């Protein structure tokens, strides 16, 4: 990784970390989810970054891919809230998340299990490590808290303007897939914890990404490509969101993912650059 690219990653990570912490501090009973998401996205711009995907605010049994729209609900006491932030500098992405409970500590064990599983995995990352092994490390820590990992959700590698670039990091032992990590790889590790079944069901779609031929003569496609490149976006970022109905075949859809048993889910996430010996956490 050349110094210019590394500096982009480090700056994206610095901004993402700050936005994550400041956004978590705004979560309170009665606050609107939409206000919190827009706060995070605007703060990202003020700090010199661009949103790599819409701010995700996933509550209770909703595990991921939920971004608020107009008229959405407010935070309520006892909510288990996941704030997932993505920032990019010139397309180089930092992805980070953490969880907080509104007013209570009923699910503190889930939050602690996710954070400690993340820390344990990070401590094992270096050149030559197989992601299947990281899944074993993550599950062992989660189960030591008498919790279960979300087996349908994984960490992932990232490349320029690509949020999921092919390498998956399982959150459980015995995964059928695995990849060897190499120095210079950029990966997001994100354990999800629950006391439920650990699977997911799909809900509505609020986030999209462009797919297909970038040379498409579709004018809307070109407009969205100029705005978002191949990064995820949401209809609330669009002037005329109904236009999406005309090009559904050119979109990747990110459905809201919900714990299959309806149980609360916690999440913790950092972006890591793999090195010869060890790694660099850019969102700590």
Image: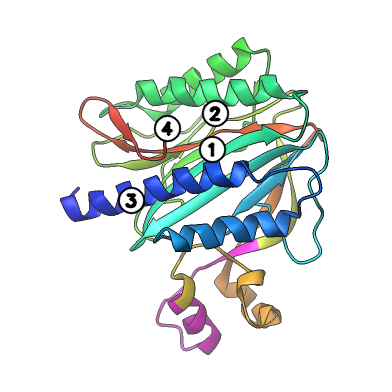
Quarter holding the C terminus is top left
According to the picture, the residue beneath numbered tag 2 turns out to be: 171
Which class describes the residues within 10 Å of circle 4: few (<14), some (14-19), or many (20+)? some
Disc 1 versus disc 2: distance between alpha carbons?
6 Å
Distance Cα–Cα, label 1 vs label 3: 25 Å
Sequence-first tag of 3 and 4: 3
Q: Disc 1 or 2, which lies upstream in sequence?
A: 1
User: According to the image, label 3 marks what residue?
Assistant: 11
Residue range corresponding to the magenta coloring: 207-226
Tell me residue 103's x, y (percent): 77, 32
**Neighbours of disc 3 within 10 Å: few (<14), some (14-19), many (20+):** many
Whole-percent x and y of residue 281?
36, 34
User: Which residue does the numbered mark 4 point to in the structure image?
Assistant: 178
Q: Gap between marks 2 and 3, in whole Å? A: 28 Å
CB atoms of marks 1 and 2 within 8 Å: yes
Q: Quick one: 236 or 29, which is closer to the camera?
A: 29
How much space separates mark 4 and mark 1, taking CA atoms?
11 Å
- Is residue 233 or residue 73 the one in the foreground? 73
* Residue 27 as seen in the image, left or right of residue 173: right
Q: Secondary structure at mark 1?
A: loop
Asked whether 66 falls inside the magenta stretch, the response is: no
- The one nearer the camera, 109 or 187, is 109
Label 3 – label 4 distance at C-alpha: 29 Å
Q: Nearer the viewer, residue 230 or 73?
A: 73
């Amino acid at each position: 990784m050349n110094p210019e690219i590394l500096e982009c990653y480090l700056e994206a990570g610095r901004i993402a970390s700050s936005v994550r912490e400041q956004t978590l501090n705004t979560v309170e009973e009665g606050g609107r989810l939409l206000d919190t998401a827009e706060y995070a996205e605007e703060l990202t711009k003020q700090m010199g970054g661009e949103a790599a995907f819409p701010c995700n605010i996933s509550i209770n049994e909703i595990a991921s891919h939920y971004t608020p729209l107009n008229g959405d609900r407010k935070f309520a006491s006892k909510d288990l809230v996941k704030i997932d932030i993505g920032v990019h500098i010139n397309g180089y992405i930092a992805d980070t998340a953490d969880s907080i409970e509104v007013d209570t500590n009923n699910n503190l064990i889930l939050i602690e299990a996710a954070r400690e599983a993340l820390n344990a995995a990070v401590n094992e990352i270096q050149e030559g490590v197989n992601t299947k092994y990281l899944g074993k490390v993550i599950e062992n820590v989660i189960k030591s808290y008498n919790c279960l990992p979300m087996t349908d959700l994984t960490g992932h590698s990232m490349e320029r303007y690509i949020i999921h670039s092919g390498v998956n990091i399982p959150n459980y032992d015995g995964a059928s897939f695995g990849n060897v990590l190499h120095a210079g790889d950029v990966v997001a590790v994100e354990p999800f914890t629950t006391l439920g079944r650990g699977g997911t069901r799909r809900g509505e779609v609020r986030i999209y990404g462009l797919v297909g031929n970038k040379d498409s003569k579709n004018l809307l496609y070109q407009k969205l490509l100029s705005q978002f490149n191949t990064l995820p976006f949401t209809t609330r970022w669009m002037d005329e969101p109904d236009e999406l109905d005309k090009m559904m075949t050119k979109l990747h859809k990110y459905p809201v993912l919900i714990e299959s048993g309806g149980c609360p889910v916690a999440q913790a996430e950092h972006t890591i650059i793999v090195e010869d010996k060890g790694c660099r956490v850019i969102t700590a």
